[in-house]
Image (tube, rainbow, N blue to C red):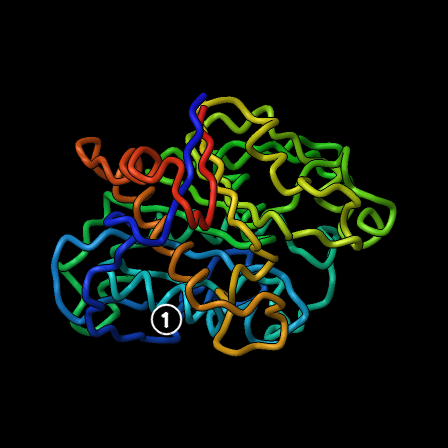
Amino acid sequence: MTQSNTNAKSNVLKAADRLPIFSYHPVTLPVEGRPVDLAMKVSAPASGDDLPVIILSHGHGRSNFLSSLHGYAPLVDFLASQGFVVIQPTHLNSKTLALPIGPEGITFWKSRPKDIQFIIDNLQRIISVVPGLDKRVDITNIAAVGHSLGGHTVAMLAGMEVTDPATGEKVNFAEPRLKARVMIGLPGGPEGLNETGRKLFGNPISGTDFSTMKLPALVINGDKDKNPNFSDLDNWRTDAYYHSPAPKSLLTVFDGEHIFGGISGYDVSETTDENPDRVSFLSMSIIAYLRSAFDKNDSSWDELKQELINSSDAKGNIESK
């Protein structure tokens, strides 16, 4: 196991000149058995070829539009400006859909990884709909990134099993076609879930098992991301790292609260730690991880860990196993 500090002055964390970007939405496709069509937003740089793909899974949240294809502009804009195609589905739990609650509860948790897998299955079809993007995308380099409940979704795609409280069935959506998986501020395990959390989100959090999460992944935790509506533990959201097998990495963002400086929207009320530098730090750390995951000869992630050890103004800490 290795540890290192990260610092915003690193060359690895220094963003390249931001490319002009564009967004196209909605891209809408029917999905068999889904109560509504799957709507997506696609963002990409206006130039460049062989662009890798990030599928971004939104959280649950109290806002009407941030938990949908309309959210996460600060993160999406940054990633697209650095050469990534970002696809944002609107999951069934979004308030924009206002669907009746079914057996999965308010999170519609089983439908969410199915949305990601549908996008992978139909990636070329989706790309071809977007003007000016066809033939510019490397559809073999795909990552899933999720925030909050979206992190839980990505954890399922990494192999985390969930016991369905309604049926007792063990559900596993492990998706090896993804070359990288990043979970930002995802819920921890059932052991640390308090009584309030069980009432609100016991389905599905009470059934999660990180020991089956065998695929490589990056877990991102804010050291001030604590919500008494979920858990009384300070480090509950690190469970996905500590309770899962290697290979895994944990990025702890110093002073990071649940919105990590404002990743879910520009100047939105749900951000309690507004800090554009933190958004940039988080974004560039994710990019370093993805570059190394997509290319075995790329050393960005190792450089991020090694070059910034003992930095005097560290913005985070990386642990790997």
In the image as oriented, which residue stretches furthest toward the front? 312
Residue 244 vs residue 162: left or right? left
Is 188 placed above or below 185 here? Answer: above
| Residue drawn at 24 percent across, 51 percent down | 52
Q: Is residue 41 visible?
A: yes
Whole-percent x, y for residue 225 in the image = 64, 52
> Number of labelled discs?
1
The residue indicated by pointer 1 is 27
Whole-percent x, y for residue 135 in the image = 13, 59
Residue 86 vs residue 201: left or right? left
Task: Please name whichever residue, 30 or 182, is drawn nearer the observer in this view of the structure.
Answer: 182
Whole-percent x, y for residue 257 in the image = 60, 57
| Residue drawn at 45 percent across, 23 percent down | 321
Q: Quadrant of the N terminus?
A: top left
Task: Please name whichever residue, 105 or 309, is drawn nearer the observer in this view of the structure.
Answer: 309
Is 267 placed above or below 146 here? Answer: below
Q: Is residue 177 visible?
A: no
Residue 18 vs residue 160: left or right? left
| Residue drawn at 83 percent across, 44 percent down | 194
Task: Please name whichever residue, 16 or 239, is drawn nearer the observer in this view of the structure.
Answer: 16
Whole-percent x, y for residue 282 in the image = 42, 54
Q: Which secondary structure, mark 1? A: strand
Query: The disc labelled 1 sits on which kind of residue?
Result: Val
> Badge 1 local density, few (<14 within 10 Å), some, or many (20+)?
some
Is 177 placed above or below 269 here? Answer: above
Task: Please name whichever residue, 277 or 79, is drawn nearer the observer in this view of the structure.
Answer: 277
Is 33 placed above or below 99 here? Answer: above
Residue 232 vs residue 219: left or right? right
Answer with the quarter of the image where residue 67 lies.
bottom right
